[in-house]
């Protein structure tokens, strides 16, 4: 099975709708990028609904593509609806949902067969993706991006604790080997901005500017083109981080990570969405993981811009 090429941040940044959960007759209807819930029992729907935006975020990060990730989530939900899969009663609802997702993923193409490193048609992202074993990437994302403990990740993957720790270490080593880049931080809270700056520098990147408003962000990009943007949504003067990113992406093709206290506003499934999204308050390892994955999956290989 040939994997769909990643799309990075090539999405129209327009007005995002707020997530209202399961409604409309207790059925989540099919949209272009929203997995169908079919007609699940109300009790099961109530248990799964809070976790759907996050399993979709995880699926997109795992596959590097929104459409591909949503496809696998949709197949998992349809299997639950048809009774082909069931949630393990010995696991928490969130862990059980991810466990079902992985059962589907592993049975329908987890090996990600595709072009090899020598294929001239393969882009840099595909080559890097193929160099990391799917299981290592799964373990890393489950713990660093989704916040599961190694023990929970082991339950999801059907592995033992020591194997998960080894898989995480292998994936981290691969990601850390990627080239450093210049980073623009769009954040109006000085303390949060300082924390993010410290994490970025710890990973070997350079912070070229910290912008507190949309105007400052645009001015910063005019002075120096970043290789990565970390953006809040609500900025100091009432301007929008979403609008700032929209302006930036209209001129440059760079990966973007949104950091916000309201992730559900961007994970509605109604429109194309950002692949990388971090919830405030954030864990340092979550930010590190997202940065590595954003640079790893972006179609253009990130590198320092010439001064």
Image (cartoon, rainbow, N blue to C red):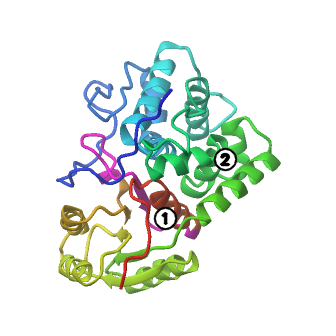
Residue receiving disc 2: 136
Name above or below for residue 171 compared with residue 1: below
Left or right position of 79 against 170:
left
The disc placed on residue 91 is none
Q: Quadrant of the C terminus?
A: bottom left
Dominant secondary-structure state across the stretch colored magenta? loop
**Residue plotted at (40% across, 45% down):** 6
The boundaries of the magenta stretch are 264-284
Query: Is residue 283 part of the magenta span, yes or no?
Result: yes
User: Is residue 223 a member of the stretch shown in magenta?
Assistant: no
Q: Which mark is residue 291?
A: 1
Q: Position of residue 165 (x, y in %)?
A: 76, 53
Quadrant of residue 84 in the image? top right
22 sits left or right of 101 in the view: left
| Image x and y of residue 197, in percent | 46, 81
Query: Which of pointers 1 and 2 lies earlier in the amino acid sequence?
Result: 2
Q: Position of residue 90 (x, y in %)?
A: 70, 32
State the image quarter where residue 210 is shown.
Answer: bottom left
Left or right: residue 204 versus residue 38 is: right
């Amino acid at each position: 099975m040939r994997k769909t090429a990643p799309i990075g941040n090539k999405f129209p940044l327009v007005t995002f709708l707020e997530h209202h959960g399961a409604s409309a007759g207790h059925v989540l209807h099919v949209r272009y990028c929203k997995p169908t819930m079919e007609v699940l029992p109300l009790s099961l729907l109530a248990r799964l609904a809070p976790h759907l935006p996050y399993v979709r975020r995880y699926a997109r990060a795992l596959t590097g593509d929104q459409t591909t990730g949503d496809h696998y989530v949709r197949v998992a939900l349809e299997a639950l609806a048809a009774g082909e899969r069931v949630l393990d009663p010995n696991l928490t609802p969130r862990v059980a949902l991810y466990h079902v997702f992985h059962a589907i993923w592993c049975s329908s193409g987890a090996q990600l067969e595709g072009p090899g490193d020598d294929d001239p048609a393969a882009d840099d992202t595909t080559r890097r993706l193929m160099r990391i074993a799917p299981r290592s990437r799964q373990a890393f994302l489950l713990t660093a991006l989704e916040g599961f403990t190694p023990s929970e990740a082991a339950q999801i993957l059907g592995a033992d604790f020591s194997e998960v720790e080894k898989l995480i270490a292998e994936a981290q080593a691969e990601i850390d080997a990627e080239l450093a880049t210049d980073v623009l931080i769009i954040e109006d809270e000085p303390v949060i901005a300082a924390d993010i700056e410290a994490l970025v520098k710890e990973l070997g990147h350079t912070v070229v500017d910290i912008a507190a408003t949309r105007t400052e962000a645009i001015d910063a990009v005019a002075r120096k083109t970043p290789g990565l943007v970390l953006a809040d949504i609500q900025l100091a003067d009432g301007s929008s981080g979403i609008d700032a990113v929209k302006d930036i992406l209209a001129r440059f093709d760079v990966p973007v990570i949104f950091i916000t206290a309201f992730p559900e506003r961007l994970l509605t499934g109604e429109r194309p969405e950002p692949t990388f999204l971090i919830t405030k308050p954030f864990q340092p390892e979550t930010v590190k993981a997202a940065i590595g994955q954003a640079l790893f999956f972006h179609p253009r290989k990130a590198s320092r811009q010439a001064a």
